[in-house]
Image (cartoon, coloured by chain):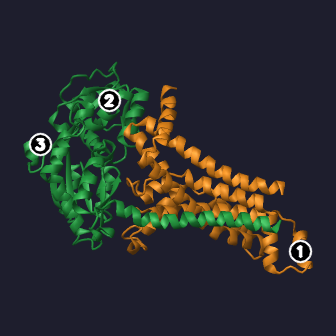
Chain colours: A orange, B green
């Protein structure tokens, strides 16, 4: 119990004193996971909508694949991205391994199926009759798309929250493709693992408190966006 | 309604865009931080150092790497893995320079042409640690293989790294020397780094083989004591070496060569000599540059 308390104290000390290294790690974490979430939205939302609206043979099979990918272990994704980016791998020329960009790539791969799966579920939930009605009222395709997205917005924000939550808390892939390089590709989760193996348990607890606070604040922001719409 | 949605969407998008922009700025400024002003070539000049967890977890590299970066302008990407993995990275040309501690496995790389310019850097030693009660009765023994035999005969819990690290290789070599194939309920593998393995061994009150540096770093939070030390075969020797740029065309020759020279130069050796004395009352590593392995008693 002492240890946990010391860790919480440590977290406050690190935040209040503005420990520059911790600040840098926190900022990088936010940027990397934020960018990955954005990319996963750009990939996942259009594909999710398409999956929800089109009918083609093998669609159910594809949905089942996407749903499986939603639960992919990050470390497996990390391994594959590692193999792709490794010097002697197919994309070795880009020299992206052990960079923050590599973490963004891996996290985008992790989050995209989540956003895609939840988006298609959200869109499918919108009543088909409503779509017909919108069409009948003379809406263009674009207008209809916007309306349906608006109708499904709560679930869509939930998809964003789920995607962001998955990548910011992920450690296996970040460690493998980022390398946990001090001052360069070290994020909150990999720093936690390292501090534990260094024996700095209080620091590790401190970092984990910061990580949880960060995850909470971002989720809070998104939830407020979501709930503000409810009142309107 | 529509207006509100557009606004919300815009805010979200803007926020994300800002993140993206900040991120790309960061990438450039990050590299900028790691070089002294005026040395522009280092923007694309980095080296990948594959090393063992003990050099990172002890904090030694946190001192040496910034020194090297300051002196040369090269950026170091330190990848701390077990020695087995580090050697594997060297063998595939996935790293530029190696700092590892498994001499006989290292020689394989030198012989097959994957590693060149191999230099002795430093040593410390391995110790057998175990619970205070010492169920196998090995405390104070001087022959490490005899001690292992006693542990096996008593079927006292032994926690192995089981991860092909330098320490794990050492441990397996001792079992071999003792003529024992360790297996059974008493022999468990953690599959994790030294720090974690010490914690597990402490929780379960078992024996384990550890390097002294990691043990000293964790000493205060675990309940394990040194049982056996001082056997010459417990020497833990670290070498630095370049991955052969002639064998692997993508390997960076100059930064790697600079790193090897840096590690064996006077200044770094002095840091190694003094590292940890203020915190642990004794050095964690002993500098050995220029010495022959045989001088160390092998």
Q: Nearer the viewer, residue B248 or A136?
A: A136
Quadrant of residue A119 within the rendered picture: bottom right
Q: Nearer the viewer, residue B17 or A173?
A: B17
- The percent position of residue B218, horizontal first and vertical second, equals 35, 33
Marks 2 and 3, how far apart at CA? 26 Å
Whether discs 2 and 1 lie on one chain: the answer is no
Q: Residue at x 82, y 55 (%)?
A: A230
- The percent position of residue B289, horizontal first and vertical second, equals 12, 49
* Element class at badge 1: helix
Badge 2 local density, few (<14 within 10 Å), some, or many (20+)? many
- The percent position of residue A53, horizontal first and vertical second, equals 78, 73
Residue holding disc 2: B152
Quadrant of residue B79 within the rendered picture: bottom left
- The percent position of residue B225, horizontal first and vertical second, equals 30, 25
Residue holding disc 3: B298
Marks 2 and 1, how far apart at CA? 77 Å
Marks 3 and 1, how far apart at CA? 84 Å
Query: What chain letter is assigned to the residue under label 2?
Result: B
Q: Nearer the viewer, mark 2 or mark 3?
A: 3
**Which quarter shows the N terminus of chain B?**
bottom right
Q: Nearer the viewer, mark 3 or mark 1?
A: 1
Whether discs 2 and 3 lie on one chain: the answer is yes
The answer to whether any part of residue B89 appears in the image is: yes
The relative height of residue A128 versus residue B215 in the rendered view (above or below) is below
**Which quarter shows the C terminus of chain B?**
top left
The relative height of residue B83 versus residue A202 in the rendered view (above or below) is below
Query: What chain letter is assigned to the residue under label 3?
Result: B
Residue holding disc 1: A134
Badge 3 local density, few (<14 within 10 Å), some, or many (20+)? few
């Amino acid at each position: 119990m002492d240890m946990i308390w010391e860790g919480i104290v440590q977290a406050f000390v690190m935040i209040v004193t503005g420990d520059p290294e911790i600040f840098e790690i926190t900022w990088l974490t936010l940027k990397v996971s934020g960018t990955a979430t954005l990319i996963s939205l750009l990939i996942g939302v259009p594909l999710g909508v398409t999956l929800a609206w089109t009918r083609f043979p093998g669609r159910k099979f594809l949905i089942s694949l996407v749903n499986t990918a939603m639960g992919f272990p990050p470390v497996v994704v990390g391994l594959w991205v590692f193999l792709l980016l490794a010097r002697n791998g197919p994309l070795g020329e880009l020299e992206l391994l052990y960079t923050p960009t590599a973490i963004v790539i891996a996290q985008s791969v992790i989050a995209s199926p989540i956003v895609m799966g939840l988006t298609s579920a959200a869109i499918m939930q919108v009543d088909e009759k409503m779509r017909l009605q919108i069409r009948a009222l003379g809406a263009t395709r674009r207008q209809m798309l916007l309306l349906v997205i608006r109708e499904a917005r709560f679930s869509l924000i939930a998809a964003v929250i789920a995607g962001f939550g998955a990548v910011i808390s992920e450690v296996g892939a970040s460690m493998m493709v980022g390398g946990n390089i001090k001052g360069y590709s070290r994020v909150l989760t990999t720093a936690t693992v390292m501090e534990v193996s260094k024996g700095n348990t209080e620091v590790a607890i401190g970092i984990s408190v910061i990580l949880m606070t960060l995850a909470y604040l971002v989720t809070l922001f998104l939830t407020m966006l979501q709930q503000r719409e409810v009142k309107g | 309604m529509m207006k509100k949605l557009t606004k919300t969407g815009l805010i979200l998008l803007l926020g994300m865009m800002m993140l993206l922009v900040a991120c790309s700025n960061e990438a450039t400024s990050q590299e900028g931080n790691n070089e002294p002003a005026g040395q522009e070539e280092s923007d694309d000049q980095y080296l990948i150092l594959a090393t063992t967890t003990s050099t990172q977890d002890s904090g030694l590299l946190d001192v040496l790497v910034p020194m090297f970066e300051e002196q040369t302008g090269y950026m170091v990407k330190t990848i701390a893995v077990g020695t087995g993995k580090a050697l594997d990275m060297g063998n595939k040309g996935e790293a530029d320079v190696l700092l590892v501690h498994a001499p006989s496995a290292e020689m394989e790389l030198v012989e097959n042409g994957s590693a060149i310019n191999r230099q002795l850097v430093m040593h410390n030693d391995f110790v057998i640690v175990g619970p205070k009660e010492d169920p196998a009765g090995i405390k104070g023994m001087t022959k490490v293989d005899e001690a292992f035999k006693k542990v096996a005969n008593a079927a006292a819990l032994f926690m192995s790294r089981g991860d092909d690290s330098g320490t794990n290789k050492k441990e397996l070599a001792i079992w071999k020397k003792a003529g024992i194939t360790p297996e059974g309920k008493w022999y468990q593998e953690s599959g994790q780094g030294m720090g974690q393995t010490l914690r597990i061994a402490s929780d379960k009150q078992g024996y384990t083989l550890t390097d002294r540096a990691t043990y000293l770093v964790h000493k205060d939070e675990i309940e394990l004591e040194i049982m056996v030390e001082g056997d010459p075969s417990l020497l833990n020797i670290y070498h630095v070496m370049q991955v052969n740029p002639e064998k692997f065309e993508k390997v960076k020759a100059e930064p790697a060569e600079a790193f090897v020279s840096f590690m064996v130069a006077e200044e770094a050796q002095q840091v190694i000599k003094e590292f940890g004395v203020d915190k642990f009352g004794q050095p964690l590593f002993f500098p050995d540059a220029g010495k022959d392995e045989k001088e160390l008693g092998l």
